[in-house]
Image (cartoon, rainbow, N blue to C red):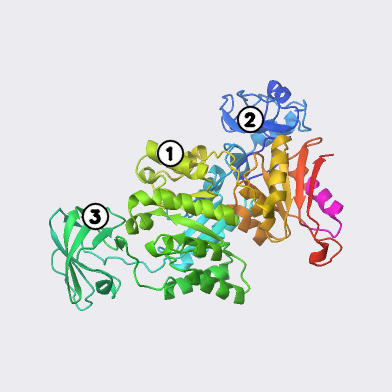
């Protein structure tokens, strides 16, 4: 079997160059870690772990000086490998060279630095699974261009990047300033909702939310951008909120404002959000991240609207308000998944509670078999610096160990100085150990499939699913081998791009399960994901003979590739 990169959607069948020694080391069924060399580095070996055969060892593999007809033992000729390596670097080539042990997914925010086709292709090759569209910035025309570019990259083959539309939500922001304002501790500062002033007095700025003066009270702490600056409310005088600076800094235009321990009394879905959601429906995005959810009814409203429109995209609740924390079970039950938006969350609840809430969200969602994205400040320092802090590395590791399905990069890839390097760090760090749930009768078969695949050192755990539920169940058990989800349509395939460890592909289902399984094996063989005599664990809830629910067949099988 050719090398298998565990970064889910990027699973191509292009063989890599190998020496005769490496070819000998690669015989046998998949299951251990090997090393391959980057094709562009001719004559120089680079240690990059990839999924290889059980007999493989950590050995540097260099590009051979000339083609040879020697077989690798997996049915792949070195001549073919050399020919492929000689081609210009492609997205699929680069994707093959990523670290193969990562099962958690990575969401990248697309911004001005990364919006063109080649930048998106580079992010995909470096490990991006889902592209995030931040509707707080950019026009619909700009985002439509990004969506088109993502689909261009997908059409090249080798990747299936999902699209996530993140609504702006009812944000409260400061107004535009002619110049940044330096504020020191003890400085009096006024926040106003007056709209009749053309020139504001010194140390004064306007606020975008008219009811701001009703939501704040004397003694409240006002946080700018989650605490970059902070102010104590000393009085409320009509349209003006008078404050005293607690922690100084530089105040610039349109900064995000929070009141610690309180949520703004704004609807979760604003008029702008509805316009953006309709835009997403027209564009066919795969996920919606609903900002500042405070109640499960916010989610129900959006899902009902999508149902009426015939849209099957998934709704992820962003947990970032104090109100949402008090209703976690209800909100998560109503949602298709969640995003832990730790920036605003840390501004509205005590900062020491944020890790506890994050852990609880991941735990509850795993019980519900729904994905969780951990977001915000994961590699914040890499917006400006080429290396992360040790605390940031630990933060990513902890999120993955908790069982989060995905981690997210925001400004790091949207407008940071080192977008690819930041993604490379997250890709390298995010190596999750398998984490098992406690027993649950509803998913016994999924646990059995996971255990069987692990014990047999299976090449892959193959799941047939018509709506994605079975793939989510198997993903939640965290097996120690790749999960190949086979489904009947491309939209469902993209919606599974967020699930831990899942690589989704489209095949035609037959009423005869044996025909469908045969097609699946052909696909695995063509993609280079399995070879003759490799062990597969297959589970499905396929429908047979065109019947209804009574004909549902739940099966768990062990097969060897022919």
Q: Residue at 56% across / 75% down in the picture?
A: 305
The percent position of residue 374, horizontal first and vertical second, equals 47, 51
- Total marks shown come to 3
Query: Which quadrant is home to the C terminus?
Result: top right
Q: Label 2: which residue?
A: 33
Residue at 52% x, 74% y is: 301
x then y, percent, for residue 31: 69, 33
Task: Say above or below: 280 vs 356.
Answer: below
The answer to which of marks 1 and 3 sits earlier in the sequence is 3
**Label 1 neighbour load within 10 Å: few <14, some 14-19, many 20+:** some
Considering the whole magenta stretch, tell me its main secondary structure: helix
- In the picture of the structure, the residue carrying the numbered disc 3 is 229
Label 1 residue SS: helix
Q: Which residue is mark 1?
A: 393
Q: Real-space Cα distance between discs 3 and 2? A: 48 Å
Which quadrant holds residue 393? top left
Q: Nearer the viewer, residue 110 or 521?
A: 521
The image quarter containing residue 242 is: bottom left
State the residue lying farthest toward the top: 21
Residue 513 is one of the magenta-drawn residues? yes
Asked if residue 81 lies left or right of residue 214, the reply is right
Residue at disc 2, secondary structure: strand
Along the line of sight, the residue nearer the viewer: 42 or 35: 35
Category of crowding for the residue at label 3, using alpha-carbon neighbours closer than 10 angstroms: few (below 14), some (14–19), many (at least 20)? many
Label 3's element? strand
Image coordinates for residue 386, horizontal then vertical, percent = 38, 38
Question: What's the magenta region?
Answer: 508-522
């Amino acid at each position: 079997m050719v090398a298998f990169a565990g970064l889910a959607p990027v699973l191509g069948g292009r063989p890599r160059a190998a020496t005769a020694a490496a070819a000998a080391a690669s015989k046998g069924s998949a299951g251990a870690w090997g090393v391959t060399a980057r094709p562009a580095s001719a004559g120089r070996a680079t240690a990059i772990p990839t999924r290889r055969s059980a007999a493989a060892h950590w050995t540097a593999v260099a590009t051979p000086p000339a083609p040879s007809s020697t077989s690798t033992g997996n049915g792949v000729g070195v001549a073919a490998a050399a020919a492929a390596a000689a081609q210009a670097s492609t997205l699929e080539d680069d994707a093959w060279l990523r670290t193969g042990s990562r099962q958690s997914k990575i969401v990248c925010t697309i911004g001005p630095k990364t919006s063109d086709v080649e930048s998106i292709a580079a992010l995909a090759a470096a490990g991006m699974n889902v592209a995030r569209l931040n509707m707080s910035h950019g026009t619909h025309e700009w985002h439509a261009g990004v969506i088109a570019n993502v689909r261009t990259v997908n059409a090249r083959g080798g990747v299936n990047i999902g699209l996530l539309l993140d609504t702006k939500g009812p944000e409260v922001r400061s107004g535009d300033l002619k110049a940044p304002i330096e504020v020191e501790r003890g400085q009096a500062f006024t926040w106003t909702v007056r709209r009749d002033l053309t020139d504001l007095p010194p140390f004064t700025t306007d606020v975008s939310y008219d009811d701001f003066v009703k939501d704040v009270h004397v003694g409240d702490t006002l946080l700018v951008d989650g605490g970059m600056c902070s102010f104590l409310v000393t009085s409320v005088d009509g349209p003006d909120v008078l404050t005293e600076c607690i922690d100084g800094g530089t105040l610039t235009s349109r900064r995000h404002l929070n009141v610690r321990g309180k949520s703004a009394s704004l609807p979760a879905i604003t008029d702008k959000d509805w316009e953006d959601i309709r835009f997403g429906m027209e564009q066919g995005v795969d996920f919606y991240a609903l900002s500042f959810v405070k109640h499960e009814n916010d989610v129900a409203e959006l899902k009902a609207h999508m149902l009426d429109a015939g849209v099957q995209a998934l709704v992820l609740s962003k947990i970032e308000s104090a109100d949402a924390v008090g209703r976690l079970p209800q909100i998560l039950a109503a949602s298709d998944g969640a995003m832990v938006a730790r920036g605003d969350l840390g501004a509205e609840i005590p900062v020491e509670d944020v890790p506890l809430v994050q852990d609880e969200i991941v735990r509850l969602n795993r019980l519900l078999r729904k994905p969780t994205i951990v977001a915000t400040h994961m590699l914040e320092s890499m917006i400006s610096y080429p290396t992360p802090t040790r605390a940031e590395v630990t933060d990513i590791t902890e999120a993955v160990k908790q069982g989060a399905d995905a981690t997210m990069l925001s400004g790091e890839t949207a407008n940071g100085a080192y977008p690819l390097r930041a993604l490379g760090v997250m890709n390298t760090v995010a190596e999750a150990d398998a984490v098992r749930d406690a027993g649950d009768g509803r998913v016994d078969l999924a646990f059995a499939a996971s255990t069987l695949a692990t014990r047999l050192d299976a090449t892959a755990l193959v799941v047939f699913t018509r709506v994605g539920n079975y793939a989510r169940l198997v993903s939640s058990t965290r097996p120690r081998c790749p999960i190949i989800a086979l489904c009947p349509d491309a939209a469902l395939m993209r919606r599974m791009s967020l699930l831990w460890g899942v690589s989704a592909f489209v095949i035609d289902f037959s009423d005869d399960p044996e025909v469908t399984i045969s097609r699946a094996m052909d696909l695995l063989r063509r993609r280079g994901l399995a070879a003759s005599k490799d062990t597969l664990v297959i589970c499905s809830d396929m429908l047979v003979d065109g019947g209804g629910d009574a004909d549902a067949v739940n099966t768990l099988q062990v097969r060897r590739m022919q």
